[in-house]
Image (cartoon, helix red, strand yellow):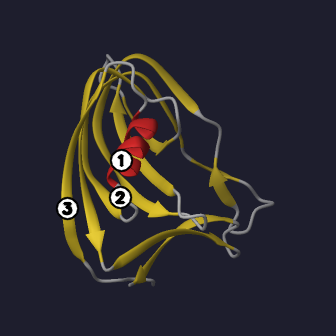
C-alpha cells in the first residue's frame, strides 16, 4: 500500500459547455489555477459522444492486463458519474486519470477509463478538490508495465 495524508486546499466548481471535451476542459482548468494534486469529486451531465476503455487481457504485459480498445457511444449519452485523480507527471505537467459511468437513451449503462472524445451535449458540472501536503504523481510501474497513481507525502 502507498498512502499520504494532507488537507483540502481549495474546491473548484466548473461547468463545461456544449461541444467541450471533458479531459481538455479539466486540463485547462488545472492549468489556469495551477492545480497539480487533487481529486475529481463529482461530475454529471450529458454527452453527445462518450469515449472510454476497459481492462482487457494482454498476456505479453506485466500483470497480464491493460486498457483495451476505445469504446465510443454516440448521441444523447447521460453522464451518471465522473471521478478521478489529478496528478503531476515527471515533467511537472497535469496528468489526469478519470473514470466515468454513462447511460444511453435506453438506460443501458456503461463505465470505464475516459480518453479524449467525451463531448458535452448540454452541460457537464464538475467539482474538484485540490490537495495540500500530498504530492499526487503518475509514475511508471515496472511490475505492471504502465503508469500508476502514486501518492507521496510532502
Residue at 27% x, 62% y is 130
Pick whichever, 37 or 77, lies toward us: 37
Q: What residue lies at 18% left-to-right and 56% top-to-bottom?
A: 11
- Element class at badge 3: strand
Q: Earlier in the sequence, mark 3 or mark 1?
A: 3
Circles 2 and 3: CB atoms closer than 8 Å: yes
- Name the disc covering residue 35, or none: 2
* Discs 3, 1 touching: Cβ within 8 Å: no
Depth check, mark 3 against mark 1: the one in front is: 1
**As drawn, is 108 to the left or to the right of 138?**
left
Q: Badge 3 local density, few (<14 within 10 Å), some, or many (20+)?
A: few
Q: How far, Cα to Cα, is label 1 from label 2? A: 8 Å
* Residue ID for mark 3: 10
- Residues marked 1 and 2 touching at CB (< 8 Å): no
Instruction: Determine whether the residue tagged by mark 1 lies in a helix, strand or loop.
Output: helix
Query: Counting residues from the N terminus, which is met first, the one under dot 2 or under dot 3?
Result: 3
Q: Is 47 placed above or below 65 here?
A: above
Quadrant assignment for the C terminus: bottom left
Question: Label 1: how many residues lie within 10 Å, few (<14), some (14-19) or many (20+)?
Answer: few
Work out whether 69 lies above or below 127: above
- To which residue does mark 1 refer? 32
**x and y percent of residue 88 in the render?**
49, 64
Label drawn at residue 62: none
Q: CA distance from mark 3 to mark 1?
A: 14 Å
Amino acid at each position: 500500500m502507498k498512502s499520504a495524508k494532507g488537507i483540502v486546499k481549495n474546491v473548484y466548481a466548473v461547468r463545461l459547455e456544449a461541444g467541450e471535451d471533458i479531459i481538455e476542459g479539466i486540463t485547462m482548468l488545472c492549468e489556469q489555477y495551477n492545480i497539480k494534486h487533487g481529486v475529481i469529486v463529482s461530475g454529471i451531465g450529458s454527452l453527445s459522444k462518450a469515449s472510454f476503455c476497459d481492462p482487457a487481457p494482454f498476456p505479453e504485459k506485466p500483470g497480464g492486463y491493460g486498457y483495451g480498445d476505445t469504446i465510443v457511444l454516440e448521441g444523447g449519452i447521460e453522464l451518471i458519474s465522473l471521478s478521478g485523480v489529478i496528478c503531476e507527471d515527471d515533467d511537472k505537467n497535469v496528468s489526469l486519470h478519470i473514470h466515468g459511468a454513462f447511460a444511453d437513451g435506453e438506460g443501458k449503462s456503461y463505465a470505464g477509463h475516459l480518453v479524449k472524445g467525451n463531448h458535452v451535449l448540454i452541460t457537464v458540472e464538475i467539482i474538484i478538490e485540490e490537495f495540500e501536503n500530498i504530492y499526487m504523481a503518475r509514475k511508471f510501474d515496472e511490475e505492471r508495465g504502465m503508469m500508476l497513481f502514486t501518492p507521496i507525502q510532502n
